[in-house]
Image: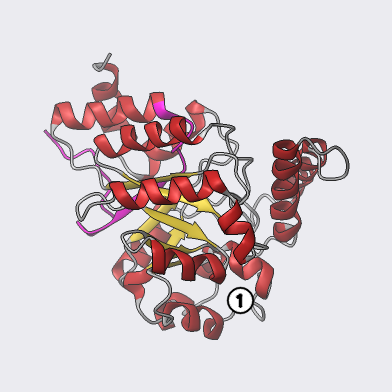
Amino acid sequence: MEDPVNHYGSNCIDWSIGAMFCHEKPLFKLLKMCKAYGVNHGMKWVFGSPLCVMAGGRVAPVDLDASDAIGIMKDWMNQGLGCRLTFQNPYLTYDDIFQDKKGMELLKAANDMSTKDVQNGVILVSDVLADIVKEKFPKLQVILSTIRAAYEVGYGPKKDTLEWYSNKLNDELYDMVVVSASKCWEEGFFEALPQKEKIEVIASHGCVRNCPRAMRHYDAMLWGSLCHMFNVPGNGSMEQCNRVVEECIRHKKSHPFEESSLNAERISHLVSIGVHHFKIAGRLDNDNDILRDVMEYVFKPEKVRYMLNTIE
């Protein structure tokens, strides 16, 4: 059987998929297919978060209690994929973290379940949280989110610079750093970065390059989620979040040639210079969208469709 996996010139490439608390059904079917046909797929992690104070990012977290969330994490780990919690709230204080009982319970469970072969982690923005994770949950990977750049310096050629990313990559606090995919359009940028084994890039980013609305989008989703969790009406409502999402969609449509998703040529180039970690964002995608993205990035779709149709 011809190999149905896209290797981009390397057998070392791995993928993190934004599907931990959503899209289980199509992804589990895909993993079942891989097992049935003996396919080494390269999918290594899933990421996401239930609703809690520490959660953050571009997608509203799923409203689950801790026990249900931990059960879902176990299901993914039984499939051989590590679980990464997207605890990307950039405003966390020490007290916020320890008062977030659900978040702390999830961190403890992720740490306790983590193994050498199936390692869990946390994707974060806050160094306060990073320090706590390193001290209390040492089995977890600490991944610095690309959101950190949006809040600390902004996105753009003179903002999230080579020096800025180099400092983060050289910081022992982080096991991995997510570098903005927009940097692929700055000639020589990735080539000049140190410690390429720590770099991760979102392949299916989907935003316009150096999105000027990124921080506003993150804030709207964060405050909307927190207002929903604490039943607080007002400016932080999900209605505001939806308006920001609609703005982003309009902006993307008006700049159709500036999307920062990576094609096969750009991924192959990154792999050739030593970058081997890539993400596929779940975001607001439905099951069909995430399945399409995983099949197009991780697999050769024309080879895998028939195989997938044989799996019940």
Magenta stretch bounds:
1-24
| Quarter of the rendering containing residue 243 | top right
Q: Is residue 68 magenta?
A: no
Helix, strand or loop: magenta stretch: loop
What quarter of the picture does the C terminus occupy? top left
Foreground residue, 170 or 274?
Answer: 170
Other residues around mark 1 within 10 Å, as few (<14) / some (14–19) / many (≥20): many
Comparing 296 with 162, the one in front is 162
Residue 23 at x, y percent in the picture = 46, 30
Query: Where on the picture, by quarter, is residue 76?
Result: top left
Name which residue lies at 77% across and 35% down.
Answer: 231
Q: In the displayed structure, would residue 278 be above or below residue 186?
A: above
- Whether 19 is among the magenta residues is yes
Judged from the image, the secondary structure of the residue bearing numbered disc 1 is: loop
Q: Is residue 249 visible?
A: no
* Rendered image quadrant of residue 235: top right
Q: Is residue 180 above or below residue 224?
A: below
Which amino acid does the dot numbered 1 rest on? Asp
Foreground residue, 19 or 208?
A: 19
Numbered circles on residues, count? 1
Which residue extends farthest top?
Answer: 312
The residue where tag 1 is placed is: 160
Judged left or right of residue 108, residue 88 is right
Q: Which residue is found at the position 16% from the left and 26% from the top?
A: 36
Q: Quadrant of the N terminus?
A: top left
Residue 66: percent from left, percent from top: 48, 36
Q: Is residue 201 left or right of residue 87?
A: left
